[in-house]
Image (spheres, grey):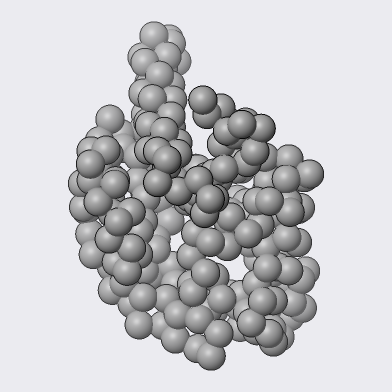
Amino acid sequence: MITFRPCTLEDSSTVIPLMFSAGPAAYRYVFSVTSNDQVLEFLEYAYKNGRGEFGYQDHQVAIKAGQVVGLVGKRSHLTNTVYTISAIKAILGFYGILNGFKVIVRGLRFERIVKPPQKGVLCLHNLAISESFRGQGVGRQLITHFIEQAQNENENENENENAKTKTKTKAIGLDVAKSNPHAQALYQHLGFQVISHNTGSLVNKYGMGNDHVYMEFKL
């Protein structure tokens, strides 16, 4: 049986490798400036800051047999500004102004491939499954859990007198690298549809940001 809970500071030693495994080449392209694994140090720094795209407060873990076996973050267009501010603060705080500016520029380039969520879409990001638990249905259960959660939240809003003042979630979105057809096949099997193909050819000596597929599950 798999259960879910919010991440905590104490999860960092397990969560950071999982987060990195969600896109190692892209992470290195953006966040490695002086060494190959500098990205891991940055992710730990940003994770412990709490908020934002890498912060522990915006992520949940999947637990099986008492172990952390999966990770996912979720965001909507309502958090885009908060995420941007949190990322800039974390980048400048970790790298300083000069190297931080380089990281910010590369991050903006990568956002042309993997774009922030649009209105009405709840995006899953940093989606990763522990290597020793892959092929056991953990990813399927994790995604299904968040689809059901979003559906329940929509139903609750429909019953709420103030529902009209809120932005209803119309779809669950996610991005997957074209180099990962197995994951894309899983998402399609779960009911996700390909919305766009976003091309990219970003390369430096540490990593790369290549083509991604953006997919949505309509609620």
User: Quick check: 179 above or below 57?
Assistant: below
Q: Which residue is drawn at 41% across and 82% down?
A: 202
Disc tally is: 0
In the figure, residue 84 lies in which quadrant? bottom right
Q: Say which of 186 and 202 sits in front.
A: 186
User: Quick check: 142 above or below 80?
Assistant: above
Q: Which residue is drawn at 58% across and 56% down?
A: 19
Picture coordinates of residue 199 (x, y %)?
28, 74
Along the horizontal axis of the image, is 42 left or right of 122? right
Picture coordinates of residue 188 (x, y %)?
23, 45
Query: In the rendered image, which quarter contains the C terminus?
Result: top left
Can residue 67 be seen here? yes
Can residue 60 be seen here? no
Q: Say which of 183 and 77 sits in front.
A: 183
Picture coordinates of residue 11 (x, y %)?
73, 45
Picture coordinates of residue 8 (x, y %)?
73, 40
Q: Which residue is drawn at 38% across and 25% down?
A: 148
Along the horizontal axis of the image, is 142 left or right of 178? right
In the figure, residue 41 lies in which quadrant? bottom right
Q: Say which of 129 and 161 sits in front.
A: 129
User: Quick check: 23 above or below 15?
Assistant: below
In the figure, residue 86 lies in which quadrant? bottom right
User: Quick check: 15 above or below 211?
Assistant: above
Along the horizontal axis of the image, is 96 left or right of 105? right
